[in-house]
């Protein structure tokens, strides 16, 4: 009897460093993990991104995450915030502008097409007023004075 499963049958992956990392790539899909990163502090969010060829799925596993969705075609014209709840599935639709801010203990699961790259995922710069809107929404929704500061 053996208690060790061969990697031919089962892969076990984990990612505990800062930021984004794919953990499983298979055929046309990818599973990735996004952890807290200073780049995603509300005061550091300067752009939104969209994926022109695919939807993207997010699941909050731990901590807090605000998912910001931007309306508009070539530029972001309006910003909405979704205070993500753990273990619910959030599907950001193809070509929807988005970004997020995470608490230091956050872990976000991402499911996306494997060919989701910078080539088909443009960024849109945010105006100073839009950046302030993101910081203000974070402060309001998380009711936490630290949301506008250098650490969450």
Image (spheres, grey):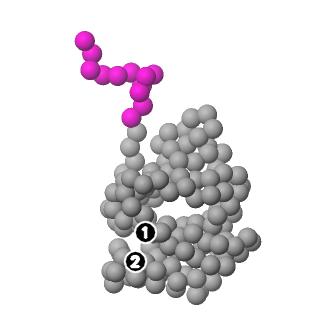
Q: Secondary structure at mark 1?
A: strand
Tell me what residue is drawn at x 57 percent, y 48 percent: 112
Quadrant of the image for the N terminus?
A: top left
Tell me what residue is drawn at x 63 percent, y 83 percent: 127
Picture disc at residue 83: 1
Task: Verify CB contact (< 8 Å) between mark 1 and mark 2.
Answer: yes
- Residue 57 in picture, x, y percent from top left: 53, 52
Q: Any magenta on residue 7? A: yes
Q: Is residue 112 left or right of residue 53?
A: left
Quadrant of the image for the C terminus?
A: bottom left
- Residue 87 in picture, x, y percent from top left: 39, 53
* Distance between the alpha carbons at the discs numbered 1 and 2: 7 Å
Residue 26 in which image quadrant: top right
Q: Please name whichever residue, 146 or 98, is drawn nearer the observer in this view of the structure.
A: 98
Q: Any magenta on residue 123? A: no
- Residue 73 in picture, x, y percent from top left: 73, 70
Mark 1 vs 2, N-terminal side: 1
Q: Please name whichever residue, 40 or 87, is drawn nearer the observer in this view of the structure.
A: 87
According to the picture, the residue beneath numbered tag 2 turns out to be: 141
The residues colored magenta run 1-12
């Amino acid at each position: 009897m053996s208690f060790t499963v061969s990697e031919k049958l089962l892969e076990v992956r984990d990612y505990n460093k800062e930021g984004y990392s794919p953990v499983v790539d298979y055929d046309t899909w990818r599973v990735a993990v996004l952890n807290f990163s200073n780049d995603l502090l509300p005061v550091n969010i300067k752009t939104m991104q969209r994926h022109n060829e695919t939807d993207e799925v997010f699941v909050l596993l731990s901590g807090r995450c605000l998912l910001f969705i931007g309306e508009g075609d070539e530029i972001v014209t309006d910003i909405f915030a979704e205070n993500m709840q753990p273990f619910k599935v959030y599907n950001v639709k193809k070509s929807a502008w988005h970004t997020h801010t995470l608490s230091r203990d956050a872990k976000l699961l991402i499911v996306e097409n494997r060919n989701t790259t910078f080539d088909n995922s443009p960024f849109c710069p945010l105006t100073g007023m839009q950046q302030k809107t993101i910081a203000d929404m974070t402060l309001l929704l998380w009711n936490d004075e630290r949301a506008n500061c250098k650490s969450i």
